[in-house]
Image (spheres, rainbow, N blue to C red):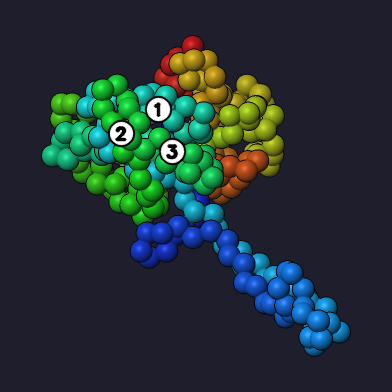
Amino acid sequence: MFFRGNYGRFGDADGREMGPKRQRYDQGPSFYGPSPGSAFMYNPPTYCYMEQTSPPPFPVVRLRGLPFDCAEVDVAEFFHGLDIVDVLFVHRDGRFSGEAFCVLGYPLQVDFALQKNRCSMGRRYVEVFRSRRQEYYKAIANEVSEPRGRGSPQRRPPRARSHDEGREAMEHTGVLRLRGLPYSANKDDILEFFKDFDLGEDSVHIVLNPEGRPSGEAYVEFADVEDSKAAMTRDRMTLGNRYIELFISSPEELDEAISRGR
């Protein structure tokens, strides 16, 4: 139901997220104009802006104080109206710690998520903090080896795997899973995304959430294993304004995902 996206390297070393900067080269007086007799009376002010392009900050927040029976759908409802790409619950010693990371669809949505700080989920007040991509992926790595015990939030398998880890460990079956799709994406959009491959509409399966709406996830059946391997070169490419992640899947996982959305 929720998906992890890739946004490259963001933020600075001390954890603050940096957006695009402008350097201003002021070659004249202030906005209000020169004083009478000033040399600038004969040299009108000019301003030059140099745009420094940098990638947008990774859109992730950390939550603390979640109810111990919390599920992904509860986090989605808590951030109602925002695009939820992924929810990662944090465990310690096999038990849910009450903390989670939530990846949002767009960097600007982080500010809206922070407005939910100290709002309630059930009977608990939930704290919401800014976080960083490095913290998020470190938490994923910890989940790989973390033993699972009682009191764990509901999560769909498989889950304990980082963005890159094990991606090539599975054998290709001809089925790929797409994550991070725009909710407005349809089959034609996905066919265009894989336009170099011989696919038909029946090869594309868009996964629906329990409410019957697109979940941002889809499965694609390729003609053979070689095509699915070649299609992995599209991993982390954009569809619309979203980064799309590709994962090796299987017909069994496809059938299970389709049955959940019915």
The disc, 2 or 3, on the residue closer to the chain's N-terminal end is: 3
25 relative to 105 in the view: left or right:
right
Secondary structure state at the residue bearing disc 2: strand
Q: Amino acid at mark 3?
A: Gln
Residue 120 visible in image: yes
Contact? badges 2 and 1 (CB < 8 Å): yes
Q: Earlier in the sequence, mark 1 or mark 3?
A: 1
Instruction: Provide the residue designation for mark 1.
Output: 78
In the figure, 30 relative to 135: above or below?
below
Q: Residue at 54% x, 54% y: name it.
A: 56
Residue 95 picture location, percent across and down: 16, 33
**Label 3 Cα crowd, 10 Å radius (few <14 / some 14-19 / many 20+):** few
Camera-nearest residue between 226 and 90: 90
- Circles 2 and 3, Cβ within 8 Å, touching? The answer is no
Does 76 sit above or below residue 107?
above
Instruction: Determine the CA span between mark 2 and mark 1.
Output: 10 Å
Mark 3 highlights which residue? 115
The quadrant where residue 134 appears: bottom left
Measuring from the top left, give residue 187's x and y in whole percent: 65, 27
What residue did someone put label 2 on? 126
User: Visible in this render: residue 252?
Assistant: no
| Local crowd size for mark 1, using a 10 Å CA cut-off: few (<14), some (14–19), many (≥20) | some
User: Is 25 left or right of 205, judged from the image as shown?
Assistant: right
Residue 199 located left or right of residue 257 = right
Where residue 92 appears, as percent x and y from the top left, is 17, 40
**Which quadrant of the view contains residue 121?**
top left
Q: Nearer the viewer, residue 223 or 108?
A: 108
